[in-house]
Image: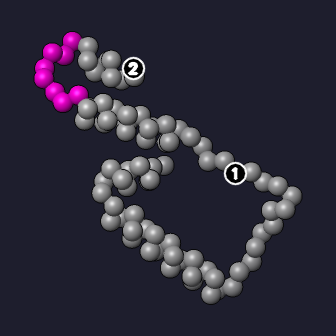
């Protein structure tokens, strides 16, 4: 909310309020996600798994399809899913 109030100070021009507020919310969300560190819980049952080349190939193919699908999304939808590190 601070960014919205700061942006309004001393500015008396006409603008579309909803897109402006949406952009501020979007940017704040992306900033929050970038600051968040990934966490994973480890427990005693967690054991490394060894898989063969067939499994690794299948995983790479699924990842390739997923990345292609994400690349086809509109900018805003892609931005909500992907954050640069």
- Decide: is 74 above or below 19: below
The label number, if any, that marks residue 18 in the structure image:
none
Q: In which quarter of the image is residue 16?
A: top left
Q: Give the range drawn in magenta.
A: 10-17
Residue 45's x, y, as percent?
84, 62
Extreme-top residue of the structure: 10
Question: How crowded is the residue under tag 1: few (<14 C-alpha within 10 Å), some, or many (20+)?
Answer: few
- Decide: is 33 above or below 74: above
Q: Residue at x 82, y 55 (%)?
A: 43
Q: Residue at x 45, y 49 (%)?
A: 83
Q: Which residue is drawn at 57% across and 83% down?
A: 57
- Reading the chain from its start, which is encountered first: label 2 or label 1? 2
Q: Considering the whole magenta stretch, tell me its main secondary structure.
A: loop
Extreme-front residue of the structure: 18
Q: Quadrant of residue 29?
A: top left
Q: Which residue is drawn at 39% across and 68% down?
A: 69
Question: What residue is shown with label 1?
Answer: 40
């Amino acid at each position: 909310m601070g960014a919205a109030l700061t942006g309004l100070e001393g500015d008396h021009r006409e603008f579309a309020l909803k897109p402006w507020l949406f952009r501020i919310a979007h940017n704040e969300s992306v900033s929050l996600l970038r600051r968040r560190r990934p966490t994973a819980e480890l427990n005693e049952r967690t054991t490394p798994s060894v898989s063969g080349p067939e499994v690794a190939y299948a995983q790479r193919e699924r990842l390739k399809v997923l990345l292609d699908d994400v690349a086809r999304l509109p900018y805003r939808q892609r931005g909500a899913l992907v954050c640069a590190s």
